[in-house]
Image (tube, rainbow, N blue to C red):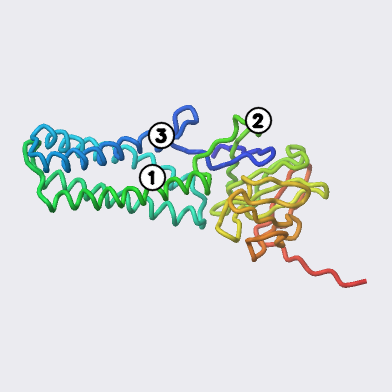
Amino acid sequence: MGTEYLIQEGGVNIMRSKASIQSHPIHPMLVGFPIAFWVGGFIFDLIGARGSNAGLWAAGFYSVIAGCVGAVLSAAAGVIDFLYTVPPESSAKNRGLLHGGLNTFVLLLFIYVAYRLGSPSAAPDGATLLLMGIGVVILAISGWLGGTLVYRNQIGVDRRYASAGKLKTRTIESWSKPVCNQSELGDGQVLMANVGTERVVVGRCSEGLFAFSDHCTHKGGPLSDGALVGCTVQCPWHGSQFDVRTGRVVAGPAQEKIKVYAIKISDGEVYVQPSELEIKPRKAA
């Protein structure tokens, strides 16, 4: 298995879309088509039904069909991002699942609408218009969730072109393999490694190298995407801050500490121990 690297400077994100063209996410490129066609089809049929306009009926029918095709293409890219971009055990995962579920329901709803219409010459009845209206409302709710995934959870956001640093990934076969060389990281830099099912961040602060979980205990945000200032890492989603030496919460809204791991350095290579490091409180002098 080849080794890939993720070296971050000043909080470069790891959540850029995996379904993209020259770093431009495909999913947001395509979502506008089903939205426009389905909403347009609803408007065509609504106006056409009131005026008995066969031309508008045909436009509505073909718009519904085109929207279904666009939705399938958009969904394919969205599923890839959901599986490989959204951090596991995070609020974005649940939000993305709801977003995808609502979109799937709307797609099935409009497929049924097309089936009810049957042909471009068919006039939409009241039940068909009601179903289309329900679909448009649910589509708006799903779109709001999609916007939240981008603007709050920063899914698919790529900040590499803002002079934030070079983005690479590292996958380690087992805990017995070195995560990195100690010379790879400068002060304030972090490296994120996938070790089995765990995501571990190694960062360097003024007191040396430290390893901690990538999972923010508040909403599951990726700490490797945050900023490491001094020996404190800040979650990019809601601003929770943690001491990377002990895992303790420096500032909320998080209330639980993050996992920290012991590090062993051998011949300049950095090894992370698989069990969580137990931090014993210091006795008062």
Task: State the separation of the CA atoms marked 3 and 1.
Answer: 11 Å
Where, quadrant-wise, is the C terminus in this rendering?
Answer: bottom right
Q: Residue at x 38, y 39 (%)?
A: 77
Instruction: Count neighbours of disc 3 (C-alpha within 10 A) and say few if under 14, some if 14 to 19, many if 20 or more.
Output: many
Q: Position of residue 117 (x, y in %)?
A: 10, 44
Q: Are marks 3 and 1 in contact (CB under 8 Å)?
A: no
- Compared to 250, does 284 lie above or below? below
Amino acid type shown at disc 2: Ser
Q: Are marks 1 and 2 in contact (CB under 8 Å)?
A: no
The kind of secondary structure element at disc 1 is helix
Amino acid type shown at disc 1: Val
Amino acid type shown at disc 3: Ile
> Horizontal placement of 74 versus 131: left or right?
right
Which mark is first along the chain, 3 or 2? 3
Residue at the disc numbered 3: 26
Q: Residue at x 31, y 35 (%)?
A: 33
Q: Nearer the viewer, mark 1 or mark 2?
A: 2
Task: State the separation of the CA atoms marked 2 and 3.
Answer: 23 Å
Instruction: Count neighbours of disc 1 (C-alpha within 10 A) and say few if under 14, some if 14 to 19, many if 20 or more.
Output: some
The kind of secondary structure element at disc 3 is helix
Q: Position of residue 89 (x, y in %)?
A: 51, 57
Q: Nearer the viewer, mark 3 or mark 1?
A: 3
Where, quadrant-wise, is the N terminus in this rendering?
Answer: top right
Give the label on residue 79, or none.
Answer: 1
Give the label on residue 163, or none.
Answer: 2
- Compared to 96, does 26 lie above or below? above
Which mark is first along the chain, 1 or 3? 3
Which mark is first along the chain, 2 or 1? 1
Q: Nearer the viewer, residue 183 or 68?
A: 68
> Horizontal placement of 99 versus 278: left or right?
left
